[in-house]
Image: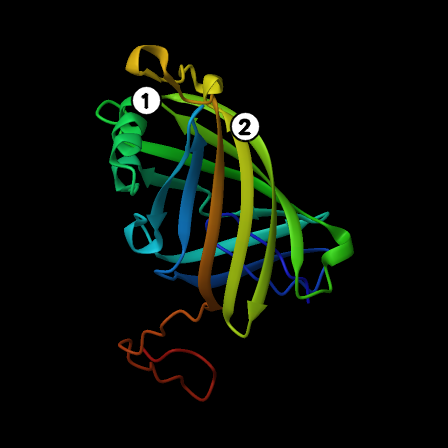
Amino acid sequence: MKKIAVLFLLLSLSINSFFAQTTFSVDLQKNSSITIHGTTNLLSFKLIQTGEKLTKRNFIITASESHNKIILSQNEHTILVKDFSSENKMAQRDFLKLVKADMYPSFHVKVNYFEIDPNTINTDQAKATVSVDLTITGKTKQYSIPVKSVHDGDNYKLNGNKKINIRDFGLDPPVEMMGLIRVSEWINIDFNIICRISDYKPSVDYSTPNVPVSSHGRMPN
C-alpha cells in the first residue's frame, strides 16, 4: 500500500498496479487550520482560518497515479479571505486591505499534481511535493510545496509550509505611522489539515423491479 499526502485534503490511496484509479470520501475535520504568519520591523502577527470555516468539508474524489504522481478529480479550492481572524485586529484590518478583500473576496488554489517521495512509499509518514497554482488579487503564481502526513486508522493529518513574497502578486507591503512600522514582503503559510478518509461506496438503487427472464434466456414479450 502506498501512503500519499494531499494539500488541504490528506488522501490515502491503495495502489496495486502501475497505473490505477481510486475513489474515496473525505471528511475535513473542524480542527484543521490554515495560518498566515507575517512580521513587521517591530513585531510578528498571524491570521488563522479554522476547518469549520473552510467553504467545503465533504468530498468524493477520484485520484489517478502514474510514475509516483497523483492527479485528483477535484483540484480547485476556494478560501474566503474575510474568514481569516487575528488577535491583532490592526494586522487583520491591514491584511484585508492589502489583499483587496472587497474586490477579491477569495484566494483560489489549483492542485496540479502530487509527486511522492519514493523513499517514503511504504512508511506511515509519507512525504510528497505538491505543485499548485495560487491566485491572489487575480494574479496567479505556481509553487512547489513539500508536504508530509501521518495517519491513525482512518484519521489522517497533513502538514506543510510555504514562504512566499507578496510582491509576486503585485502587492506592496504596507507602511504605517509615517514609516515607523514596515510590514515585511515575506509571509509564511502553514496548513494543518486533518481529515477522515474512507472507501467510497455508492448507494445502490433498489427501486428498479426485477424483470423475469424466460427459460430460453430471453426477456418475455
* Mark 1 neighbour class, 10 Å CA radius: few under 14, some 14 to 19, many 20 or more: some
What residue appears at the point 55 percent right and 72 percent down from the top-left corner? 152
- Coloring scheme of the render? rainbow
* Mark 2 neighbour class, 10 Å CA radius: few under 14, some 14 to 19, many 20 or more: some
Q: CA distance from mark 2 to mark 1?
A: 20 Å
Kindly check if marks 2 and 1 are in contact, taking CB atoms under 8 A apart as contact: no
* Residue projecting furthest to the top: 178
Residue 66: x and y in percent read 68, 49
Residue 131: x and y in percent read 58, 37
Viewer-proximal residue among 30 and 88: 88
Specify the amino acid type for callout 1.
Leu
Viewer-proximal residue among 133 and 210: 133
Specify the amino acid type for callout 2.
Gln
Viewer-proximal residue among 75 and 175: 175
Q: Nearer the viewer, mark 2 or mark 1?
A: 1
What residue appears at the point 33 percent right and 24 percent down from the top-left corner? 99
Viewer-proximal residue among 172 and 215: 172
- First in sequence: mark 2 or mark 1? 1
Residue 81: x and y in percent read 30, 35
The residue that disc 2 covers is: 142
The residue that disc 1 covers is: 98
Asked which quadrant contains residue 94, the reply is: top left
Say which mark, if any, is on residue 107.
none
Disc 2 on helix, strand or loop? Answer: strand
What residue appears at the point 68 percent right and 62 percent down from the top-left corner? 2
Residue 92: x and y in percent read 28, 33
What residue appears at the point 40 percent right and 84 percent down from the top-left corner? 213
Rendered position, 55 above or below 81:
below
The N terminus - image quarter: bottom right
